[in-house]
Image (cartoon, helix red, strand yellow):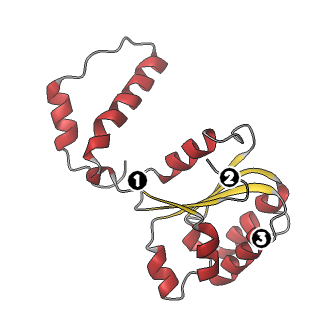
Amino acid sequence: NISNNSRLLITWEAGSGKSIIASIIYNSTEKHDLPFITLNTNNKTEQQITKEILADNSIVNKINEGVIYIKEITNLNLQQQNTLSKLIHNNKTKIKLITSTVKDIDKLVQDGQFSHYLYDCLKISHIHIDPIRKRKEDILPLFQYFYNKIIKQMGYKSIKISDKTTFILTDYDWPGNV
């Protein structure tokens, strides 16, 4: 659960399911009826990031309850990181903050490219997700979950998954995204 004034940092490579984890965490909290806002910093200019996340009329400053998920937190420049640190430190709202990155944030902190203070603020809780190719034991449960969900949505009757299908799924290398 995301406790009061809590932050969560989710790390690992693209397509490892960080957004899904953020959504699951949000849906498992007592705040799941409040807004869940995703702010994706990928392919955004510095001005767009400032406007969406840090400006006086930004989402972060407009809502006072709910969960904000910032995808690719490391795209913020150092000035933006310092501003976000101040917002977190002075936060008088009940906003919960989930952030994620595909980059090696520890190295960025060591190299002075990411604010140590913001890193400490964000890493109240930390989840590191390995890609599916390193989690072979998760392949069949994930497949079964999505298979059943799609079958139900389409109104079809479920069939038993063959041993051959099971072997193909678990033997596949799973490069790239989930």
Q: Which residue is mark 3?
A: 87
Closer to us: 35 or 137? 137
First in sequence: mark 2 vs mark 1: 2
Q: Is residue 59 left or right of residue 1?
A: right
Q: What's the CA distance linking mark 3 and mark 2?
A: 18 Å
Of callouts 3 and 1, the N-terminal one: 1
Q: Give amino acid for label 2.
A: Ser
Residue 59 percent across, percent down from the top left: 78, 58
Q: Residue at x 52, y 82 (%)?
A: 109
- For numbered disc 2, what is the local secondary structure? loop
Note whether residue 41 is visible: yes
Do the CB atoms of the residues marked 2 and 1 lie less than 8 Å apart? Answer: no
Viewer can see residue 115: no
Between circles 3 and 1, the one closer to the viewer is 3
**Horizontal and vertical percent position of residue 57:** 85, 63
Q: Quadrant of residue 84?
A: bottom right
**Residue type for callout 3:** Leu
3 and 1 marks in contact (CB < 8 Å) = no
Q: Classify 10 Å Cα crowding around label 2: few (below 14), some (14-19), many (20 and above).
A: few
- The residue to which callout 1 is attached is 16
20 shown above or below 84: above
| Residue displayed at 45% across by 18% down | 152
Alpha carbon separation for disc pair 2 and 1? 25 Å
* Drawn side of residue 124 relative to residue 16, left or right: right
* Extreme-bottom residue of the structure: 112
Q: Which residue is mark 2?
A: 3
Give amino acid for label 1: Ser
Residue at 27% x, 54% y is 134
Identify whether 108 is placed above or below 130: below
Which of 13/3 is in front?
3
Percent position of residue 156, x then y: 40, 13
Ranked by sequence position, the earlier of labels 3 and 2 is 2
